[in-house]
Image: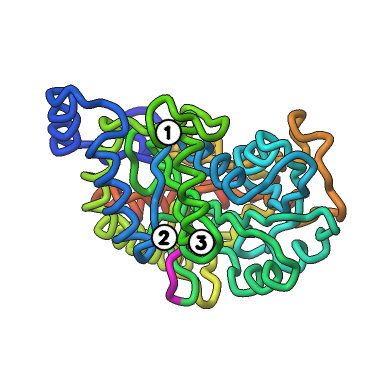
Amino acid sequence: MSGVVPIPIARPQIGEQEQAAVAAVLASGRLVQGSEVAAFEEEFCAQVVAGRRGIAVNSGTSALHVGLLALGIGPGDEVVVPSFTFAATANAVRLCGGVPVFADVDPVTFCLDPAAVEAALTPRTRAVVPVHLFGQPADMTRIGALAAEHGLRVLEDAAQAHGATWQGAPVGALGDAGAFSFYPTKNMTSGEGGMLTTADAGVERTARLLRNQGMEERYRNEIVGLNYRMTDVHAAIGRVQLRRLAEWTAARRRNAAALTAALTDLGVPGITLPRTASGAGHVWHQYTLRVAAGRDAFVEELTRRGVGAAAYYPVGVHRLPAHADGVVPNPLPHTDAAAAEVCSIPVHPGLGEGDVERIAEAVDAAARLLA
């Protein structure tokens, strides 16, 4: 609509403190894997994952890849993953030579369904990667019990869930390892980057070797490694962002509560609002609606009205060409339904006064127009 300033689906919060931190690193002349990276690892883990150890890398995908390798995943190993997620989750399995086995999601939380995980297990299964999607934790109680019973490793994909909790415990500290992303649209950013977290000293050391060409001492390559190092520039940004993570999480939660209240009062037709599972501490990376019919037209109408909206993961990973030969042992009806029906609307901490009301009114108008 002409003359309306759009409300974006995401708005990275970058200011003078981040700029000053970057300038200080550039002035120092130490740009890669120096004191800023070490400090970021320590501070992030103390604040976010109850003091586990952290290995900073150059992306969330790298954190997943290094995590799986450090957990011993290799050629032919089956790893259970959801299909309703970003492809990086399954890509990391492939990069290890493993086989992604796609399991269905819970229709309410959109996270990996423990019953579907159990149904997908075979003698070749070595690990499971639950994704804490949109900021809501997967059921780590049941997934953890399955892993213990069957001797599986658990790598949490916490790319969208900085600060989320399950039964009071932080995600990224519930499995054998956790992988976080600091991509610009995440709940906090380092510009680009990732973090692997673990309490296992062996996994930590292997991950540190893997990210740095397989060496702890220069020119003493112990294993075949990768160049997944984080720069001090990115770590400096991350350290500044980390200091505001709790504030931003609180704002996301307030915005989510306000959206739910406003949309409930309006009685929007054909729309199912998101729900938080019992025991979950949601951090609202996205506020995700289910649209009964015409999801794509609904997104287009919201965009026309100046409200950013996005249909994340409109194709299940198991249906992508890159993973067409992946293992799908059982039908994935909830994955296919979510891919066709859900969309996200703004919930980020950059929302201004009146934005929540404007978003709710646009959702109501678009839904009634298309009903």
Identify the image quadrant of residue 34.
top left
> Residue at left 53%, top 38%?
61
Number of residues whose C-alpha sits closer than 10 Å to that of mark 2, classed few (under 14), some (14–19) or many (20 or more)? many
Counting residues from the start of the chain, the first of labels 3 and 1 encountered is: 1
The magenta stretch spans residue 254: no
> x and y percent of residue 226 in the render?
52, 29
Rendered image: mark on residue 58? 1
> x and y percent of residue 154 in the render?
61, 59
In the image, taking residue 280 as reference, residue 328 lies left or right, namely right
User: Of circles 3 and 1, which is in front?
Assistant: 1
Where is 344 relative to 36, above or below?
Answer: below
Residue 76 seen from this side: yes
Label 1 residue SS: loop
Determine the residue located farthest toward the front in the rendered image. Answer: 220
Label 2 residue SS: loop
Closer-to-camera residue (89/341): 89
> Residue at left 51%, top 45%?
206
Residue bearing the label numbered 2? 283
Label 3 residue SS: loop
Q: Tell me how far mark 2 sits from mark 1, CA to CA.
A: 23 Å
**Hey, what amino acid is under mark 3?**
Gln
Number of residues whose C-alpha sits closer than 10 Å to that of mark 3, classed few (under 14), some (14–19) or many (20 or more)? many
For the magenta stretch, what is the residue range?
A: 168-172
**Hey, what amino acid is under mark 1?**
Asn
Identify the image quadrant of residue 223.
top right
User: Of circles 2 and 1, which is in front?
Assistant: 1
Q: Tell me how far mark 3 sits from mark 1, CA to CA.
A: 24 Å
Q: What's the image's color scheme?
A: rainbow
Rendered image: mark on residue 136? 3
**Hey, what amino acid is under mark 2?**
Val
